[in-house]
Amino acid sequence: MPNSSPHPLFDVLIIGSGAAGLSAALRLPPSLSVLLLSKSSINAGSTPWAQGGIAAALGGIEDIEQHIQDTIRAGNELPDAAVVQRVVRAGAEQIDWLLSLGMPFSGDSNQLHLTREGGHGARRVAHAADHTGRTLMETLLEAVKARSNITVQEQKLAVDLITTHKLGALDAPNRCLGAYVLDLTCDTVHTVRADYVILATGGAAKAYLYTTNPDGSTGDGIAMGWRAGCRVANMEFMQFHPTCLFEARAKSFLISEAVRGEGGLLLLPDGTRFMQNYHPDAELAPRDVVARAIDSEMKRLGIDCVYLDISFKGRAFIEEHFPMIHARCLQYGYDMTTQPLPVVPAAHYTCGGIMVDEQGQTDLDCLYAIGETSHTGLHGANRLASNSLLECLVYGQACAQHIASRHSAKENLSPSPLAVPDWDDSQVTDADEAVIVTHNWDELRRAMWDYVGIVRTTKRLQRAAHRISLLRREIQDYYAHFRVSNNLIELRNLVDVADLIVRAALARPESRGLHYTRDFPESDPKLAHINTICTPIPAEKLGCELGIHSVTPDMTHANKT
Ligand code: FAD
Ligand code: SIN
């Protein structure tokens, strides 16, 4: 590591240790020094929880063409066709790469077992039984261990990005210089410098009361990128997974869509099917359709959940295909080999995010965003099942290649015009009432669930916007006066992201994919290819945003371009 700077200086800082961050780290040349951070344990992101698998068209040209069409149809025509083609065409190469790292997919390397999920016209999902994410993490981490250029640090929470404009150098082009990072083991904020920074911090489903996501899905990367001046797109499209186990003790446990892919049926409490009334593909309709249908049946009948039944496939089949789900459900007293499982929809995936180009580059020079944090154009108004891990891998590789070529071209990254100051917490004190943070967490997530959920109205969205603006002010105030903690930082990010979601939803006067509003129940063909783009106020209008005393940009507009 070069050490002429008073702060640690790496070639590349990767914030996030999921599929996106780890694959980017592995794709970077071993000659580059890489620091990879996780705010919690290395396995804290969504990746280890992935069940269904990795979508990849392995069946030749026709399969590729159909995967492209399925992705665009599931995304309600909004996906960027060029992006879809590029990502889908890279599928086979990504699976080969994982096989070369030793990933034990189900089936054998000559003939992988492929499962099916909603919206896919064919069996196309490579998987490791029903614990694809866990196995993927093990594979990637094993490979990372063998790379001496990659330093992995846990319990390191990135607070904010450091940019030339935040340092006051407003005449120079804005560039990312690193990040302030809270070391949770000693409650100290460190300055980390890097030539290139990659945000790989996952999604923001924790903005909702009920979610399939782990606790850390608080949209940190989206909020940090936004505050640093990056545009954010399509935040109204929060995906709700149709089948989360309805069991309080499980907190949030997903029942994979592959259960329906392998024949599982959705039932009302009296045992009747209903999905055929909503879509010709019934249980295998795209996720937005299935989640909305379940929500509608629950409201129509006043019931707490619906049921997912695959027991008729028999114990041997279920134990082979869904060993992890079966074992976990047994812990809560449900035997899926003999009975249907109670299920409800829950917030699952953030389709929008920081706008990036095909190399994962954001609006800010030297800052990249990959994985669920980013908006690449792949998902449009609704992500096709198992396309997320594929996107993580493809963009992990793309951004690594881009950084490597910039680095090897010895591109002149002119030194920062100002020295990067240390984090200044001399003006703040220890938090006096932690209850404010916990109360606001609950209030925000409940407001999002109640007002910005599966079915929306303009009035509900306006109500949410009002609540969020009050909460935001309160949280900003708290942030300005008290020492940072992980809960406070996550809450500050979550309220920024909630604000982006609501403003984007209000800016789309139609229903499309995951954004369904009773006030505009139809899709508007004029908006079929229009992304909702939120543009931050330019930094020069903000003044300095450093250390504790930051001013988060207000949304000027959630405009359509
Ligand atoms: P994550 O895996 O979420 O990793 C984020 C990382 O960032 C973590 O290491 C976290 O600690 C770190 N981090 C976050 N904020 C900070 C910060 N401020 N400072 C430092 N570190 C930070 N997709 C599929 O394609 N197929 C599936 O079968 C599938 N199943 C799923 C099942 C479940 C239950 C869930 C929740 C999701 C599933 N998805 C699936 C979606 C997919 O798993 C995620 O979209 C994908 O794993 C995201 O990967 P990522 O690398 O972008 O982020
Ligand atoms: C699942 O297994 O149902 C999740 C797949 C996904 O989110 O893509």
Image (cartoon, grey):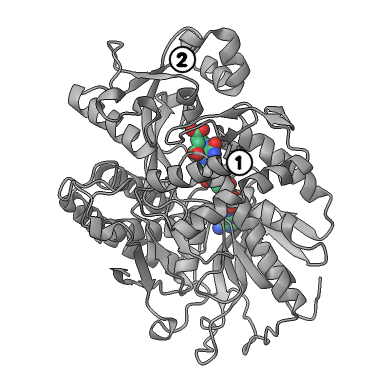
Mark 2 vs mark 1, CA separation in Å: 31 Å
Q: Observer-nearest residue: 426 or 35?
A: 35
Inspect the image, locate mark 2, and give the three-letter code of the amino acid beneath it. Ile
Can residue 94 be spotted in the picture? yes
Give the crowd class for mark 1: few <14, some 14-19, many >=20 residues within 10 Å.
few
The N terminus appears in which quarter of the rendering? bottom right
Number of callouts in the render? 2
* Residue 470 visible in the shown view: no
Residue farthest front in this picture: 62
Q: Residue at x 73, y 37 (%)?
A: 103
Q: What kind of element bears circle 1?
A: loop
Give the structural element (helix, strand or loop) at label 2. loop
- Please tell me the numbered disc located at residue 310: 2
- Which residue does the image show at 55% across and 75% down from the upper left? 426
Nearest-to-viewer mark from 2 and 1: 1
Residue 60 is tagged as: 1
In the picture provided, is 70 more to the left or to the right than 445? Answer: right
Residue drawn at 61 percent across, 41 percent down: 60
**Residue 186 placement (x, y as % from top left):** 66, 57
**Image side of residue 92 versus residue 289, left or right:** right
Mark 1 belongs to which amino acid? Gly
Q: Nearer the viewer, residue 55 or 467?
A: 55
In percent of width and height, residue 267 lies at 33, 17
Q: Which quadrant would residue 181 be assigned to in this image? A: bottom right
Expressed as whole percent of the image width and height from the top left, the position of residue 33 reads 78, 66
Does the beta carbon of the residue at mark 1 sit less than 8 Å from ligand 1? no
Figure quadrant of residue 159: bottom right
N-terminal of the pair, mark 2 or mark 1, is 1
**Residue 78 at x, y percent in the picture:** 36, 54
Label 2: few (<14), some or many (≥20) within 10 Å? many
In front of the other: 426 or 149 = 149
